Structure formats: C-alpha cells, structure tokens
Image (tube, grey):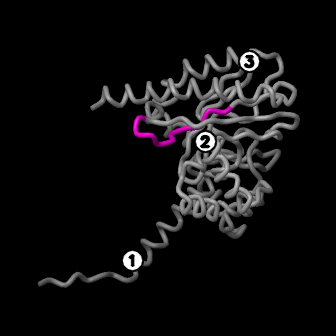
Amino acid sequence: METEVVDVAEKGRGSEGAQSIRRALAILRIVAAGQERGVRLIDVVTSTGLSQPTVHRILRVLIEEGAAEQNPKTRRYAIGNEVTLLGLARVARFPLRAAAEPYLQYLSETLGDTIFLTIANGDDSVCIGRWPGSYPVKVLSIDVGARRPLGAGVSGLVLLSSRTDSEIQAIVQRNARRLAALKVDPAALIERAHEVREQGYSYTAKGVVLGSRAVAVPVYDGTGAVVAGIALATITARLPASRLSPVIQEMQKQAELLRQRIAEIGRSRI
C-alpha cells in the first residue's frame, strides 16, 4: 500500500493562496456595493476587518488587473471593466429577470411606483431589475447591481426570513461588521426576520431614501423555495396605512403569477 507524501510547505502555500483569493473577493464585494459613487479605503477596511496595508495591497493588484479602479479626484474605489466584461460571459445566468419582466412592469404601471427585483447571492442581496413607476416623483433608492448585506432593506429581509433560524444567525454573524457600518443592530435584525417570516411580507415606514416607504413580498419557485423579493418604494404620502394592504395583495398576486411562470419554465427543461 502506497503512502501519500504531503509537502507541508506546498500545503501551506495553498492555504495562503486560498486565503488571498477569499480576501480579494471579499474586497470586491464591498467595492461593488459602492456602485458608481465608489467606496473609501477606510470603508473597505471597516467592512472586511482586514488591516489597511492588506486592503491597500490587494486593491493595488485588483487595479493592475482591471478588476477595480480608483477615482483620482475622490480617491474612491469602484468595480473595474474587467469584472463587467467577465459578467457578460453569463448573461443568460439570470432568466428570472426575463421571466419577471411583464409582471413587474405591470406593477410599476398600475401602482405607479418603482418596483425592484432582488435575489440572494451568498450573504448578500443583489438588485437585478428596476422598473420606475408612472408617478412623477420616483424613488430610485437602489440601482441595478446594488449589493447589500442580506437583511438590509425590505427585499433583503424577505430573503433572509426564508432561511432557517440557524442560517439566519450565521448570516447575520458573518455580516456583523457591514451591518454595524449601516447602523443595523444584529439582534433586532434577527427578530425582524422572524416577524417577516410570520406575516409574509416586509414593510418599513422609513425607506433608504429620506421621506420614502417600502414594502416587499417573496417570490417562490416551483418547489416552494424563495428565489427573489419584489419590492415597491415610494414617497411617504403615497403609502399610508389604508393603501398598504391592497398594494401587498397586488404584489402577491403578481408574485404568484411569476411563480407559475417559473414552474412552467422548469417543467419545459425536464
């Protein structure tokens, strides 16, 4: 019987390499959250928990490879063209957005307010679609591609609440630094996720944009798993208590039609 000889030095280098990749990806996720505005070096340091020299070194390499860029005036970091181009290789990766288009367009036109489609990606929520409403004053609180810690925002809460209690605890713990930067209390977030799970929707009287309100409902697939969140954002005056229930009902109706469409697509691929 042969004995496998393990090169300890090589194994150590492999571990270091994996750690460097994880750190680079963690930094890219924080940079991506800054959208066009970008993020400061201190924001990346605070959110990742890495030392400033480590963050600066990795960002320098990412810039050299075109995965990140820095605004010479603001000194803020943003996602580079290389990441955008790599993403084009999987444009068909999000058939959900195409399937959701008619239902969410309908909601934006009939309700008059901005509608968002958001999915979970790891410990984050990512907006993959936005449909501005017909009302003159539009609340464009989240850009397409915006990434936030799972649970931050009404759609993120809907997605977080669909997980098991142990999963919720673990996700919130892993996102602790980023949530703290957003002034979100972890214990309160966990409690809120449980409430959202019970009521079947998420609502906030104080949206991301000052003077706005938002509500979100889950989207299920053919197996009953939550695959996305549909959110509506509008100015405070347009979402009084008297309008909340009919808005939720219409959103849930379109979410159910989307679920049926997703199930149809799934059956056609069997």
- Residue holding disc 2: 126
Amino acid, disc 1? Lys
Image x and y of residue 198, in percent = 62, 47
The spot of residue 72 in percent (x, y) is 78, 46
The numbered disc on residue 11 is 1
The magenta-colored residue range is 222-231
Q: Quadrant of the N terminus?
A: bottom left
Q: Amino acid at mark 2?
A: Val
Residue lying farthest left?
1
Which of pointers 2 and 1 indicates the residue nearer the eye?
2
**Residue 99 can be seen, yes or no:** yes
**Membership of 228 in magenta stretch:** yes
- Dot 3 corresponds to which residue? 112
In space, the residues marked 2 and 3 are separated at their CA atoms by: 23 Å
Foreground of the two, 59 or 189: 189
Indicate left or right for 212 with 70 as reference.
right
User: SS for tag 3?
Assistant: loop
